[in-house]
Image (cartoon, rainbow, N blue to C red):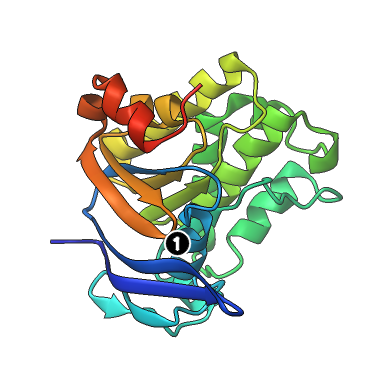
C-alpha cells in the first residue's frame, strides 16, 4: 500500500505551469530521490505535497486521505515533515528551543522528551551544543538541527530539499548515514530532492527524473547510477 500517492499533479505560478501532470507513489520505508536540472519542478512538487502551494489540478493522497486542499500545519500533524532548502532554523533560539518548535503540534510530553533524546543520539554534536543558539552553528550543524527539528513531528514521511548543499564531504557522509538509519530502523519513508544527481542516487533506492515539470524517467537508483550514458542524457552531471 502506498503511503504517498500523487495523481496528475499540476502546479502553476501565475501563468506558468511549473508541474505538468506528475504521477508518483512512495511506500512506507522507501527511499526515493527526485533529480533533474534547475526548473525541473522538484522543489515545487515538495511544496505541493506539503500544502505550501495549492495544486492547480490533480490529487495528493497521504496515508489514504486526500490532502490536496489541506493547510500546511494540518498536513504536518498527519505525520509529513519537510526540511526546506536553506535549512530555515530559528537563528536566535537555542538548539533545544528549535527542537521544541518542531514539536509544536504535539501534546504527548513524555514522548516528545524521548524524541529529543533520540535526536541527540542521531546527532551527538547537537547534544554537546544544546544551549547554543542556532545562528552560531556551522552550516552542517544547522542542517543537522533542521532535520532533527523535522523529526520532532514523528513523521512517517520526511521530505528533504537539497539537504547536502554547501556541506563538507565528511558532513555529507554523516547525514547520509543518519538518513539511511531512519529508513532502516524506523521504517520512515524519505523523498530527497538533490541537485547533485550522483549523490542522490548513491543514497536512495528509487529515482525519478523530472524535466520541465514532467516525469521523464523512473528506475532503481543503483541501475541509473551504473548507466552513465542514460544519466548524462537525462541530467546535467558534473
Q: Which element type, helix, strand or loop, lies under badge 1?
A: helix
- Seen in the picture, residue 145 relative to 77 is either above or below; the reply is above
Tell me if residue 152 can be seen: no
- Location of residue 14 in the rendering, given as x and y in whole percent from the top left corner: 61, 79
Residue at 77% from the left image edge and 28% from the top image edge:
138
168, 17: nearer the viewer: 17
Residue at 67% from the left image edge and 60% from the top image edge:
101
Q: Is residue 183 left or right of residue 199?
A: left
31, 9: nearer the viewer: 9
- Location of residue 235 in the rendering, given as x and y in whole percent from the top left corner: 41, 35
Quadrant holding the N terminus: bottom left
Q: Is residue 191 left or right of residue 51?
A: left
Estimate how packed mark 1 is, as few (under 14), some (14 to 19) or many (20 or more) residues with alpha carbons within 10 Å. many
Label 1: which residue?
45
- Seen in the picture, residue 192 relative to 26 is either above or below; the reply is above
- Location of residue 106 in the rendering, given as x and y in whole percent from the top left corner: 52, 68
Q: Residue furthest top?
A: 170
Residue at 85% from the left image edge and 34% from the top image edge:
136
Question: Could you say which quadrant of the image residue 218 lies in?
Answer: top left
- Location of residue 79 in the rendering, given as x and y in whole percent from the top left corner: 40, 64
165, 228: nearer the viewer: 228
Q: Is residue 44 left or right of residue 78?
A: right
- Seen in the picture, residue 57 relative to 134 is either above or below; the reply is below
Q: Residue furthest bottom?
A: 69
Tell me if residue 164 can be seen: yes
Residue at 58% from the left image edge and 16% from the top image edge:
169
Amino acid at each position: 500500500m502506498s503511503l504517498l500517492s500523487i495523481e496528475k499533479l499540476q502546479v502553476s505560478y501565475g501563468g506558468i505551469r511549473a508541474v505538468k501532470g506528475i504521477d508518483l507513489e512512495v511506500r512506507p520505508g522507501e527511499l526515493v530521490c527526485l533529480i533533474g536540472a534547475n526548473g525541473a519542478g522538484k522543489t515545487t512538487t515538495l511544496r505541493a505535497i506539503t500544502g505550501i502551494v495549492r495544486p492547480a489540478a490533480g490529487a495528493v493522497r497521504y496515508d489514504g486521505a486526500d490532502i490536496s486542499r489541506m493547510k500546511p500545519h494540518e498536513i504536518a500533524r498527519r505525520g509529513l515533515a519537510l526540511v526546506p532548502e536553506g535549512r530555515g532554523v530559528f537563528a536566535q533560539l537555542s538548539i533545544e528551543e528549535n527542537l521544541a518548535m518542531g514539536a509544536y503540534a504535539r501534546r504527548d510530553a513524555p514522548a516528545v522528551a524521548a524524541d529529543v533524546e533520540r535526536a541527540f543520539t542521531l546527532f551527538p554534536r547537537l547534544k554537546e551544543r544544546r544551549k547554543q543558539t542556532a545562528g552560531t552553528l556551522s552550516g552542517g550543524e544547522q542542517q543537522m538541527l533542521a532535520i532533527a527539528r523535522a523529526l520532532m513531528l514523528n513523521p512517517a514521511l520526511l521530505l528533504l530539499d537539497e539537504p547536502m548543499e554547501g556541506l563538507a564531504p565528511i558532513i555529507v557522509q554523516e547525514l547520509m548515514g543518519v538518513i539511511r538509519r531512519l529508513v532502516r530502523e524506523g521504517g520512515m519513508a524519505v523523498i530527497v530532492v538533490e541537485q547533485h544527481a550522483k549523490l542522490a542516487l548513491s543514497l536512495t533506492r528509487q529515482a525519478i527524473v523530472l524535466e520541465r515539470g514532467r516525469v521523464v524517467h523512473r528506475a532503481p537508483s543503483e541501475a541509473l547510477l551504473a548507466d552513465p550514458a542514460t544519466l548524462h542524457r537525462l541530467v546535467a552531471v558534473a
